[in-house]
Amino acid sequence: MGLHCGFCCTKIKNISVTLGKKEILKDVSIHIHCGHLTVIIGKNGAGKSTLLKAILGEVKHTGEISFKNKDADGQKIRIGYVPQKLNIENSPMTVYDMIASYTSMHPVFLYKNKKTYQEIKNHLKDFGAEELIDSKVNRLSGGEMQRVLLAQATMPYPDLLILDEPVSGIDENGKAQFYEKINELKTNHDLAVILVSHDFEYVKKYADDVILLDGKVVEKGKPSEVFDSKAFHDAFGGV
């Protein structure tokens, strides 16, 4: 592990997104380094989720997104993604089914692969969720679902982990555990992590870099720099 900037980073350069006649993002440029938690903050409608979708290739955009590590310069690397929510209310899937489908190209509903089952169970254990492997996903609590989705997104461990407000609706204890886990992941696995969050107290404590977005980057830097800035106070009234 222990890669430093220059050996491993995601470069987002001049990303612009227009939907219809509305410009959602304009010339957004960010570097996300391995082993760093970069948090994107901004008011509703600032383009935070749109930026994540552009990185994931889900929305049409102009500009460049390149990934660089010691093995692949400019090549597409593995991205793990935890969405804000999933539409699973009527899903019959178990946690095993969902993760096995994500990690395998083969249908998993016909039979359980014992080796895959044990691998998933072992990985879930790292997230305190091994006992959930046979649970129906539509029966999980918010905190349980968040742990399962984080386990899924890191199996295998990605080069870049993208998290879109993954703890919205989760209690304070669950949030604290989540941020501790992200801190552990970025440190132990040298992950580059992009997180969209409104939890400013946790952002101040855990983020390495903060980006204040409002259609464009209006402020960026260390948490203390961004939270003390005029742009932050203008946006949030000194929250």
Image (cartoon, grey):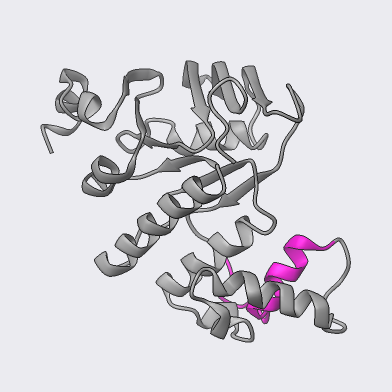
Relative to 67, residue 138 above or below: below
Q: Quick one: quadrant of the C terminus?
A: top left
Front residue of 151/199: it is 151
Q: Nearer the viewer, residue 148 or 239?
A: 148
The x, y position of residue 151, in whole percent, is 58, 64
Q: Quadrant of residue 70?
A: top right
**Image position, residue 116 (x, y; %):** 79, 74
For the point 57% across and 48% down, the residue is 189
Say whether residue 162 is magenta: no
Q: Nearer the viewer, residue 29 or 160?
A: 160
The picture places residue 174, in percent across and down from the top left corner, at 33, 67
Q: Is residue 93 magenta?
A: yes
Q: Which residues are magenta?
A: 87-104
Does residue 86 appear in the picture of this structure? no
- When asked about the image quadrant of residue 106, the answer is bottom right
- Residue 184: quadrant of the picture: bottom left
Quadrant where the image shows the N terminus: top right
Tell me which residue sits at (60%, 32%) in the image: 55
Q: Is residue 112 left or right of residue 160?
A: right
Instruction: Name the residue located 51 percent from the left edge and 34 percent from the top edge.
Output: 50
Judge whether residue 120 can be spotted in this image.
yes
